[in-house]
């Protein structure tokens, strides 16, 4: 290990103790770097936390599912050996229908086909083709999600060959590119006839984003989600003990690797020396020094609000101001005295994500209300019942339901947040009553987060479910904004590792791993 | 030369409606000696048709020799935007626009030229389909083309984002946004809406050369030239004023049409436009691949006749009567809110008004002017019901009041006011024919129009639905269909021989 340089306490400072910050810090510490992790809150976790919302009812209060987790991260951090267990894997989805003709959208083709043909005979065949295409495209995109959007500046792949060759080598053909350029609404309109399947798949695609399902390029979203793990080995999972359990395991890994973790340490300014980053200034007046700083805060917070703004190239700064990261999802957690009855839904399907969105038109109307700063009466919901497979979360007989509701505008409840929370809960509960009539009577505890509540928790980064819209102007080399001299960092020594970087949001850990790899490379060449 | 054929004879093609693309196809077929029938439910009132600007494909005009039938090219009209305290004008000449912008914002005047270049690259890429999407998904290298990356960005971003990051003046942002999304039903905040900047009419406004030119006298003048061309080909005798009741479907294809009077006309090809006004589009829905209605489905149009041109603040009468497109206080925020209301089947009273002023019969009554008003995001049917009876009058009154606030005295000079679109639902007052109520916009989901689409749909064998392509200019789709039919006939001829 090198000697401590004067004014250099560490090799690397990581800001933010969410999944990506933790993963990045552990990987760097495993590479024998001296790492300090600064978390503003009193506890770690960011958007991943498990809380007791009523006596005897625990739930993942914010992010309620994880995955697909980065395979490389799982391996290098030895997460399963450190004690990470999952109460459910390969969680699929069910499109709920008020009349009991639910559609099962999972890996089992037969189930899906059967439930689809209850609505439209042709949709079962269409689904087989749709699922196959999605899987094929996901395989083609897999490499893209696993590597930095920019190849390393030196060594293999440093010189970019012709663009077209690149594309061909990535294995993506023109026809696929054309399909991915469509909007999810148009793709679904072309593929299916049933309203429910179109509504549910569109919701599943755009969940968390501020755009409507008619946005160009949104057909890419289901493919992208799948691309992280094309074979669906683990898929979307629920850690036993909730999302907070994942963080506990990562904290343990950080401890083993020798990461110095400081909670209650809010970084508010970057420190510079000769145009390059030298450390961070904390809200309590203290300064921490290191030649590399990695931020898991939002790109806007990192570049525009912590003193780095003056060094940014003009075009980059302008583009960053246009970066869309307004949150659109509200979180409602319900403590239930018993298990609600969903008409004609087999109990084994209660472990899936329950999607409530009856048609594309309904989703468009929810978005229309959002454009006007209101919430629609028919909100689109994604609900889970984690206590079905993780009974340790609740007292015997009880259940918890965790619900993402959208589109909820940031402006909603700006005047009177308490009234807005009440309005939201009653909208969500009355929507769920259409599917499970006995649910309202079982509610014994409620826990609500409006987008602005999430913003307060996550330093602005957590307000958006994906750390910024996953539209094609904010993906790949354009995430968070195009910078002509990439892969060199815009501000020397300052890196991003949050969801506002390639390959986008979701509890995967990939962003953290890619950031760690980039920083290690930068250290090697002395940048 | 084709001779007016009796109705029982076998025709080569049946053309339905009076849209430009159908007329282009008909003229082209007639000129090449095909026997056709041209069917119209009503005689189009060319004299009183709104003088909407019209961009035509120069090659299409040459192909049909329309200049010898009276077509003249004209200058592209400017776009003028008025706000409470200022106004701006956009001209196809970049210098003129920049000079005007300098008074509003030095920054925007300086950025304008670079913006035009970016849009021009975007339009170049439009020809290559979705390949603009490619660089965004691949692993680009340090040496890769940042211009290409910028174009990928423009294709994925929303109008609001692109205009917001490029220009500082909200009036300029609102003007370009409203002009670019005219007639589409798309919100300026929708990712991907920025690709509408590569529409041919926006390119013409920005002064990007694209092989299209404006027709002097607008759409009515183009109709007159096309009709003259049809007369020249002696096909005018085949034009019949009769509505179409249904398609004749045989052997999985359209083989002809049944007219409102019960006669059956047969032909291997039927050409129609997807406009609701003059085609049996309720019949179209029987084909699964039928195109969705696009043009104008969300735009209301009003026609006013006034004694003098409206005196709009800070817009000179000369500029106003030269065919300028005037936008009253355009703003992206208001467009987004109106779009939200539109999807929810409501109407905001805060209209985003766009208008043209044209002289009417200058020879006979020089004191009359026609004001054509277009309002985006007016739902074809609101929660309160369809636009009919007193509701139509209320809508007209509200729009009149808004214009009057911008042009004092407008209401007093009013001679007539008509709501052209949304039209009174046919059959609404006639309860015996509920089936004839036409479907509204097909679906509440407005799809981002595909700029690369050539405007030709073939939902079933023998049926061609043609509309003006957003990138190719008037005439392209119609002539392409006529040529495809010609090629088809030649192949068949060979097979028979």
Image (cartoon, coloured by chain):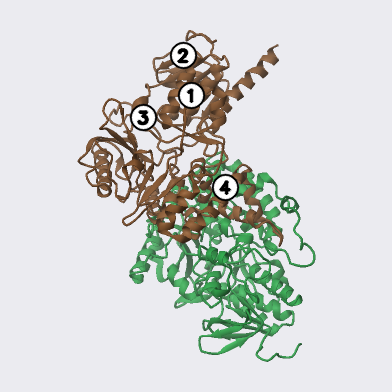
Chain colours: A green, B brown
**Disc sitting over residue A369 in the figure:** none
Chain ID, mark 1: B
Q: CA distance from mark 2 to mark 3?
A: 23 Å
**Along the viewing direction, whichever of B451 and B122 lies nearer the viewer:** B122
Please name the residue that numbered disc 1 is placed on.
Answer: B23
Q: Position of residue B28 (x, y in %)?
A: 55, 21
The label on residue B49 is 3
Disc number placed over residue B120 in the picture, else none: 4
Label 3, residues with CA under 10 Å away: few <14, some 14-19, many ≥20: some
On the question of residue A381 being in view, the answer is no
Percent from the top left, x then y, of residue B50?
36, 32
Tags 2 and 3 on a common chain: yes
Task: Kindly state the secondary structure of the residue where label 3 is placed.
Answer: loop
Q: From mark 4 to mark 3, how far is it between C-alphas?
A: 33 Å
Q: Quadrant of the C terminus of chain B?
A: top right
Task: Judge depth for marks 4 and 2 and give the one in front.
Answer: 4
Q: Earlier in the sequence, mark 2 or mark 3?
A: 3
Q: Which residue is mark 2?
A: B238
Q: Which quarter of the image is occupied by the N terminus of chain B?
A: top right
The one nearer the camera, B277 or B176, is B176
Kind of element beneath mark 4: helix
């Amino acid at each position: 290990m090198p000697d401590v340089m004067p004014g250099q306490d560490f090799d690397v400072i990581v800001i933010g103790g969410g999944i990506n910050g933790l993963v990045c810090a552990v990987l760097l510490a495993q590479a024998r770097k001296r790492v300090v992790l600064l978390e503003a809150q009193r506890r770690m976790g960011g958007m991943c936390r498990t809380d007791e919302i009523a006596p005897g009812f625990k739930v993942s209060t914010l992010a309620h599912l994880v995955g697909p987790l980065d395979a490389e991260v799982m391996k290098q951090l030895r997460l399963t050996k450190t004690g990470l267990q999952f109460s459910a894997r390969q969680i699929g989805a069910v499109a709920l229908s008020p009349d009991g003709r639910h559609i099962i959208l999972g890996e089992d083709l037969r189930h899906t086909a059967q439930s689809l043909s209850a609505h439209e005979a042709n949709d079962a065949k269409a689904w087989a083709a749709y699922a196959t295409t999605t899987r094929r495209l996901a395989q083609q995109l897999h490499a893209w999600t696993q590597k930095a959007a920019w190849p390393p500046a030196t060594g293999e792949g440093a010189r970019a060959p012709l663009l077209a060759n690149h594309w061909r080598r990535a294995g993506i053909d023109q026809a696929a590119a054309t399909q991915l350029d469509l909007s999810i609404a148009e793709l679904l309109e072309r593929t299916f006839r049933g309203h429910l399947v179109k509504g549910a798949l569109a919701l599943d695609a755009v969940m968390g984003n501020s755009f409507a399902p008619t946005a160009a390029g949104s057909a890419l979203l289901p493919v992208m989600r799948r691309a992280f793990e094309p074979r669906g080995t683990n898929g979307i999972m629920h850690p036993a003990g909730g999302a907070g359990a994942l963080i506990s395991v990562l904290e343990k890994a950080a401890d083993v690797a020798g990461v110095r973790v400081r909670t209650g340490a809010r970084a508010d300014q970057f420190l510079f020396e000769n145009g390059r980053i030298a450390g961070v200034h904390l809200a309590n007046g203290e300064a921490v020094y290191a030649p590399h700083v990695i931020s898991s805060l939002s790109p806007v917070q990192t570049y525009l609000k912590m003193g780095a703004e003056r060094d940014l190239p003009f075009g980059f700064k302008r583009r960053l101001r246009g970066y869309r990261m307004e949150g659109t999802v509200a979180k409602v957690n319900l403590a239930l005295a018993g298990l609600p009855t969903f008409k004609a839904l087999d109990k084994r399907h209660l472990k899936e994500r329950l999607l409530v969105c009856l048609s594309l038109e309904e989703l468009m109307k929810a978005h229309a209300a959002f454009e006007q700063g209101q919430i629609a009466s028919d909100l689109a919901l994604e609900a889970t019942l984690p206590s079905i497979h993780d009974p340790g979360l609740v007292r015997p007989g009880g259940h918890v339901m965790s619900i993402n509701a959208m589109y909820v505008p940031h402006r909603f409840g700006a005047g009177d947040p308490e009234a807005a929370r009440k309005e939201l809960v009653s909208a969500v509960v009355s929507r769920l009553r259409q599917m499970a009539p006995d649910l309202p009577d079982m509610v014994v505890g409620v826990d609500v987060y409006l987008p602005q509540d999430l913003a307060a928790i996550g330093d602005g980064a957590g307000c958006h479910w994906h750390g910024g819209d996953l539209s094609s102007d904010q993906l790949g080399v354009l995430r968070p904004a195009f910078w002509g001299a990439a892969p060199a960092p815009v501000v020397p020594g300052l890196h991003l590792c949050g969801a506002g970087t390639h390959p986008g949001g979701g509890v995967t850990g990939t962003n953290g791993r890619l950031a760690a790899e980039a920083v290690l490379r930068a250290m090697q060449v002395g940048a | 030369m084709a001779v007016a054929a009796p109705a029982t004879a076998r025709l080569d093609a049946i053309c339905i409606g009076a849209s430009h693309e159908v007329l282009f196809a008909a003229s082209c077929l007639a000129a090449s000696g095909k026997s056709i029938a041209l069917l119209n439910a009503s005689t189009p009132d060319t004299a009183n048709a709104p003088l909407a600007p019209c961009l035509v494909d120069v090659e299409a005009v040459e192909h049909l020799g329309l200049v010898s039938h009276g077509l003249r090219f004209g200058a592209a009209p400017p776009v003028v935007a008025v706000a409470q305290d200022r106004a701006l004008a956009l001209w196809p000449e970049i210098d003129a626009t920049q000079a005007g912008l300098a008074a509003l914002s030095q920054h925007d005047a300086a950025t304008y030229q670079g913006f035009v270049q970016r849009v021009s690259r975007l339009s170049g890429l439009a020809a290559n389909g979705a390949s603009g999407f490619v660089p965004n998904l691949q692993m680009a290298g340090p040496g890769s083309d940042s211009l290409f990356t910028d174009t990928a960005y423009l294709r994925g971003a929303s109008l609001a984002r692109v205009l917001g990051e490029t220009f500082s003046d909200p009036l300029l942002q609102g003007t370009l946004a409203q002009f670019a999304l005219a007639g589409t039903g798309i919100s300026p905040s929708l990712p991907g809406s920025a690709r509408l900047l590569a529409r041919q009419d926006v390119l013409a406004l920005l002064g990007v050369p694209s092989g299209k030119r404006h027709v002097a006298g607008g759409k009515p003048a183009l109709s007159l030239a096309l009709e003259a061309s049809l007369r020249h080909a002696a096909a005018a005798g085949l034009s019949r004023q009769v509505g179409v009741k249904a398609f004749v479907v045989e052997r999985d294809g359209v083989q002809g049409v049944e007219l409102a009077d019960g006669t059956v006309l047969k032909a291997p090809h039927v050409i129609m436009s997807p406009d609701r006004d003059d085609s049996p589009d309720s019949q179209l829905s029987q084909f699964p691949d039928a195109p969705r209605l696009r043009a104008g489905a969300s735009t209301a149009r009003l026609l006013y006749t006034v004694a003098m041109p409206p005196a709009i603040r800070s817009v000179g009468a000369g500029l106003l009567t030269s065919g300028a497109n005037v936008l009253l206080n355009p703003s992206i925020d208001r467009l987004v809110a109106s779009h939200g209301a539109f999807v929810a089947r409501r109407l905001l009273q805060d209209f985003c008004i766009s208008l043209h002023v044209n002289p009417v019969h200058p020879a006979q009554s020089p004191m009359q002017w026609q004001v054509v008003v277009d309002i985006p995001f007016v739902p074809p049917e609101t929660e309160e019901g369809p636009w009919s009876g007193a509701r139509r009058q209320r809508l007209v009154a509200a729009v009149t009041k808004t214009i009057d606030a911008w042009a004092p005295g407008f209401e007093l000079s009013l001679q007539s006011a008509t709501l052209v679109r949304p039209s009174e639902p046919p059959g609404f007052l006639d309860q015996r024919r509920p089936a004839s109520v036409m479907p509204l916009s097909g679906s509440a989901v407005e799809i981002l129009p595909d700029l690369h689409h050539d405007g030709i749909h073939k939902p079933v064998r023998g049926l061609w639905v043609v509309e003006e392509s957003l990138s190719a200019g008037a005439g392209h789709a119609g002539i392409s269909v006529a040529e495809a039919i010609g090629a088809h006939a030649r192949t068949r001829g060979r097979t028979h021989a």
